């Protein structure tokens, strides 16, 4: 669930008011003079065993959000907590343990696996880093994990280039579940794969979730995949969540104008190619200087009085969803 | 096949039984096996398939874009507006590539020279192929950029490629492709690297312009949904062979080949949330050691004995053909003889 | 989830697989080199030099230091293939034994500068920040030192010897490896698999040991092979000007140097050691180029 309301299970991941910015230019002393504002005040929760999908276009900050959550992008403001424990506040050993409670699966299994290490080493790397296991134990553990993701244990001594893209992604998934994580961040896990293989990976991830009670945060641009895969969805635009709620509600009947555009332009068998007017073409605004008021108003076809004011993500009166648009309410 | 001589004259592109292989260290990779594709004038034709199925190789071979000396054509013919491109040398091909056919690639950054302003790159192409004067070329360039919904074309022409966003660059490239009024545009995954909203616009722009100018388009994509929205007819390729083709609606509404069926069934769009998708088991065969018989047979759910020993030929009627033994095609009727 | 790895077959298969993959690799190398015959030529030269180094006593027909005043400055003949020098030593034997000093020195120089350079470079790249900046500026200073001048200074301070001049050349060569290793480290650090490792909680040392060093090595080895040729030349040059191997050690540069005085009338004296230098340097360069092309991913799958 997003925006913490009536959660049944306790949230595994809590992100509150997260802001991530990167220095875009520096003066001669190395001090930043301007920033790229990648994530601008994101608050979300994922409850245990559930899955939250983050949809948006490139540059909307969804990947940076994933990186900040997993600890690859530093953030100045906000809080990320896993199982109620703040990540930024943790130090040393405790921090490493917290980190191993969440794992990430990257988009391209080609680049996320070191091509010089054999599969058993790749799969057992998180355990190897944790320490305390002999190579024989790691090998045996890697064998179990390989079977769990549908790889053959006799392939453990091979190098990644001997595998197809789908099998490599299975290796990456086996590695991610090796530490029995509570949360898995899936950063476009099927985008680099062929269509026929995508389905295998999606099935595998859903099966692992059922078997192990995993909690997923899925980052994707593919609306159809998110609709299929997630309980809840959050749509991002320019570093903000513009609409969030149960997947069938948000993607079935979008209320924020941006979500409507996004859904209209997603390729589909059911609908014809949208007209250019429907797509509301425009570039994503420059995120070095954030616009005042609603971030979407330049492109919005429904812009009206009131859009100059900053929009807040508020719960709509009908249903469980939130939208960041004052027009969506009525 | 619809390759009667009468029809041939009306074709923009007629690839007939093209077979091609890449010799490598461990043996020849048979990238294309008897591929036949026909693109009529003013027709938008899609080629769908997964990576490595030969969809790009087909059109690159037809336009002479494959690296010389690295491939071998082992059979078949190509007629591009009734010119035999396979017999042309590089300078003739360059001429053909500007005037008759243009290709739009997936990664727009690689196709533009990063050190030259957009305007000059556009006008150079126009001047070379249209023999226009510089002012004329600039006017044509401006018009076509405006046609691609690029606001302030004058300003954009003064920019370098890196100053444009991916979607803008791709629109510039489409402008460049259309600028010489070629009879055929080959769009090779032109929107794969782009966002869906930009993709929708670019597909519309290609479609509008092609319809208005009567340009034929070959649209190569791995995304069946995109092809379904854009194309009149489509070819489905698997492992270097055409497995099915026909009018887009017919093929997608009632796919006949098990591969096409599986390809459509494994999409999450058509299944209830959280339900298991009907994944295609296994992986695409290596084209160095393809399986005997039908290439899809190892992954097929309903193979018969014939599938393992003989490869099915395309057969059907009314511009709708499928290469599958299960579709009631007796071996005799699918022989080569009936197609020539 | 219930299946346990079958331990016996798994234990047996890696060795078999390794053997298979080695023969596969050799076949692949052979395939690649067939398409660039020059690499093969270079490899043959290096093999020849290696044989000379290992089996010098077997190949050389004479003791290289045996003086024979009756056989001074003889032209090449069946008895003395390369002729003799001013005290009647057999030049063929001296050239063969000279390979030990010349190539041994070159090899040591490259080995030292490579290991020191890679260590500093990876450290610099991993630590980053001001330490990195300081190290790189220091390397710029070292880079500005001319090898020969440094060698002369060391020779003046410590006395001329092959070791001192080797040291000088090795020091001057370090920055090239530092830069290369640092560049590799910086680009590898951004690779997704290194990022993944960081999310597992890996320490910088772990990442260096398991991910960066193994992946950074191939370009560094190419650089080392290419360097070898140049260093053979420099070592010879140092000996030629009297800063390297001291007589009566046979070393190619020293041989050319002593042969210089007889250049006009006894052409063979300087020519054969000179050719040895030329051919060895060329061989190293050819092999270096060849390896670089083989490792180049753009050329790989063709």
Image (cartoon, coloured by chain):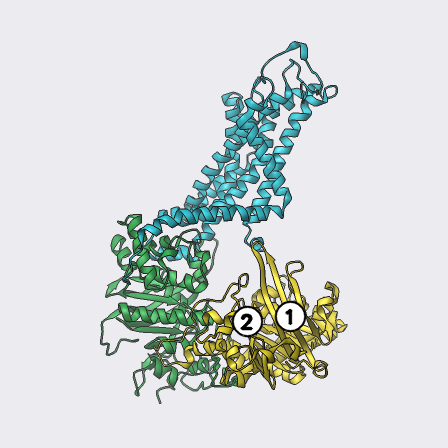
Chain letter of the residue carrying label 1: B
Residue furthest toward the top? C70
Chain letter of the residue carrying label 2: B
Q: Which mark is residue A318?
A: none
Q: Is residue C269 visible?
A: yes
Crowding near the residue tagged with mark 2, few <14, some 14–19, many ≥20 C-alpha atoms within 10 Å: some
C261 vs A161: above or below? above
Numbered disc total: 2
Looking at marks 2 and 1 on the same chain, the residue that comes earlier in the sequence is marked by 1
Residue furthest toward the bottom? A330
Q: Secondary structure at mark 2?
A: loop
Q: Which mark is residue B310?
A: 2
The spot of residue C138 in percent (x, y) is: 48, 39
The spot of residue A119 in percent (x, y) is: 39, 55
Q: For this view, does A208 lie left or right of residue A292?
A: left
Q: Hue of chain B?
A: yellow
Point out the image quarter for the N terminus of chain B.
Answer: bottom right
- Tag 2 and tag 1, C-beta contact below 8 Å: no
Crowding near the residue tagged with mark 1, few <14, some 14–19, many ≥20 C-alpha atoms within 10 Å: many
Chain depicted in cyan: C
Residue at mark 1: B18
Asked which quadrant contains residue C274, the reply is top right
**Cα distance, mark 2 to mark 1?**
19 Å
- Residue at 69% x, 20% y is C78
């Amino acid at each position: 669930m997003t925006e913490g309301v009536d959660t049944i299970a306790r949230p595994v991941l809590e992100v509150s008011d997260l802001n991530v910015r990167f220095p875009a230019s520096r003066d001669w002393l190395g001090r930043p003079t301007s920033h790229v504002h990648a994530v601008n005040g994101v608050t979300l929760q994922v409850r245990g065993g559930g899955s939250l999908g983050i949809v948006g276009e490139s540059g909307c900050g969804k990947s940076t959000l994933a990186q900040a959550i997993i600890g690859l992008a530093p953030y100045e403001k906000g809080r990320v907590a896993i199982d109620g424990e703040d990540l930024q506040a943790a130090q040393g050993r405790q921090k490493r343990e917290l980190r191993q409670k969440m794992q990430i699966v990257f988009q391209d299994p080609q680049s996320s696996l070191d091509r010089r290490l054999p599969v058993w080493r790749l799969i057992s790397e998180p355990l190897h880093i944790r320490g305390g296991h002999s190579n024989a134990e790691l090998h045996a553990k890697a064998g179990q994990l390989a079977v769990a993701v549908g790889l053959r244990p006799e392939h453990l001594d091979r190098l990644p280039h001997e595998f197809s893209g789908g099998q490599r992604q299975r290796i990456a998934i086996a590695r991610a579940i090796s530490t029995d994580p509570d949360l898995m961040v899936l950063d476009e896990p099927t985008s680099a794969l062929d269509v026929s293989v995508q389905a295998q990976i999606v099935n595998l991830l859903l099966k692992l979730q059922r078997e192990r009670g995993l909690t997923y945060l899925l980052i994707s641009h593919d609306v159809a995949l998110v609709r299929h895969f997630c309980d809840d969805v959050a749509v991002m635009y320019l570093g903000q969540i513009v609409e969030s709620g149960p997947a069938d509600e948000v993607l079935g009947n979008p209320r924020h104008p941006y979500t409507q555009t996004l859904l209209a332009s997603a390729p589909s068998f059911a609908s014809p190619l949208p007209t250019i007017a429907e797509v509301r073409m425009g570039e994503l605004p420059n995120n070095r200087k954030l616009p005042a008021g609603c971030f979407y108003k330049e492109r919005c076809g429904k812009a009206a009085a009131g859009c100059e004011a900053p929009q807040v993500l508020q719960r709509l009166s009908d249903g469980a969803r939130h939208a960041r648009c004052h027009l969506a309410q009525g | 096949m619809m390759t009667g001589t009468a029809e041939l004259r009306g074709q923009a592109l007629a690839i007939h039984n093209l077979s091609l292989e890449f010799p490598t260290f461990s043996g020849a990779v048979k990238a294309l096996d008897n591929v036949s594709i026909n693109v009529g004038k003013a027709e938008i034709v899609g080629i769908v398939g997964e990576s490595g199925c030969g969809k790009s190789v087909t059109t690159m071979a037809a336009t002479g874009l494959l690296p010389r000396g690295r491939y071998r054509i082992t059979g078949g013919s190509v007629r591009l507006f009734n010119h035999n491109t396979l017999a042309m040398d590089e300078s003739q091909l360059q001429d053909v590539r500007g005037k008759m056919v243009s290709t739009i690639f997936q990664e727009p950054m690689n196709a533009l020279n990063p050190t030259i302003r957009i305007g000059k790159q556009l006008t150079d192409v126009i001047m070379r192929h249209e023999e226009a004067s510089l002012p004329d070329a600039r006017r044509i360039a401006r018009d076509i950029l405006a046609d691609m919904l690029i606001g302030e074309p004058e300003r954009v022409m003064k920019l370098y490629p890196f100053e444009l966003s991916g979607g803008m660059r791709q629109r510039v490239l489409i402008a460049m492709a259309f600028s010489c009024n070629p009879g055929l545009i080959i769009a090779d995954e032109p929107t794969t690297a782009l966002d869906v909203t930009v993709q929708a616009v670019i597909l519309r722009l290609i479609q509008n312009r092609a319809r208005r100018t009567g340009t034929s388009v070959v649209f190569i994509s791995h995304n069946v949904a995109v092809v379904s929205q854009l194309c009149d007819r489509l070819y489905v390729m698997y492992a270097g062979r055409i497995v099915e083709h026909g009018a887009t609606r017919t093929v997608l509404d009632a796919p006949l080949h098990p591969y096409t069926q599986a390809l459509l069934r494994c999409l999450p769009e058509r299944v209830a949330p959280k339900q298991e998708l009907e994944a295609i088991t296994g992986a695409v065969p290596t084209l160095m050691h393809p399986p005997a018989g039908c290439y899809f047979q190892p992954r097929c759910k309903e193979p018969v004995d014939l599938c393992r020993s003989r490869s099915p030929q395309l057969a059907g009627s009314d511009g709708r053909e499928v290469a599958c033994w299960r579709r009631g095609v007796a071996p005799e009727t699918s022989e080569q003889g009936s197609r020539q | 989830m219930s299946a346990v790895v079958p331990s016996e077959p798994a234990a047996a298969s890696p060795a078999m697989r390794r053997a298979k993959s080695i023969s596969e690799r050799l076949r692949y190398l052979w395939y690649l080199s067939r398409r660039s015959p020059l690499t093969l030529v270079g490899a043959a030269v290096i093999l020849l030099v290696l044989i000379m180094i290992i089996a010098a006593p077997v190949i050389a027909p004479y003791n290289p230091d045996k003086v024979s005043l009756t056989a001074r400055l003889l032209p090449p003949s069946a008895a003395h293939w390369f002729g003799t020098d001013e005290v009647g030593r057999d030049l063929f034997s001296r050239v063969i034994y000279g390979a030990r000093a010349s190539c041994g020195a070159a090899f040591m120089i490259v080995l030292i500068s490579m290991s020191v350079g890679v260590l500093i470079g990876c450290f610099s790249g991993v630590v980053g920040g001001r330490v990195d900046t300081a190290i790189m500026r220091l390397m710029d200073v070292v880079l500005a030192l001319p090898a020969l001048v440094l060698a002369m200074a060391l020779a003046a301070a410590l006395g001329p010897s092959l070791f001192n001049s080797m040291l000088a050349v090795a020091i001057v060569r370090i920055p090239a490896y530092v830069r290369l290793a640092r560049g590799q480290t910086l680009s590898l650090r951004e690779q997704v698999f290194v990022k993944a490792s960081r999310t597992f909680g890996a320490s910088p040392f772990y990442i260096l040991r398991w991910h960066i060093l193994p992946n950074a090595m191939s370009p560094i080895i190419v650089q080392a092979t290419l360097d070898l040729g140049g260093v053979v030349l420099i070592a010879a040059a140092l000996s030629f000007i009297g800063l390297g191997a001291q007589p009566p050690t046979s070393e190619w540069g020293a041989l050319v140097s002593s042969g210089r005085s007889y250049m006009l009338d006894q052409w063979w004296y300087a020519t054969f050691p000179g050719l040895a230098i030329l051919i060895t340097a060329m061989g190293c360069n050819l092999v270096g180029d060849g390896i670089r092309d083989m490792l180049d991913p753009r050329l790989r799958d063709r």
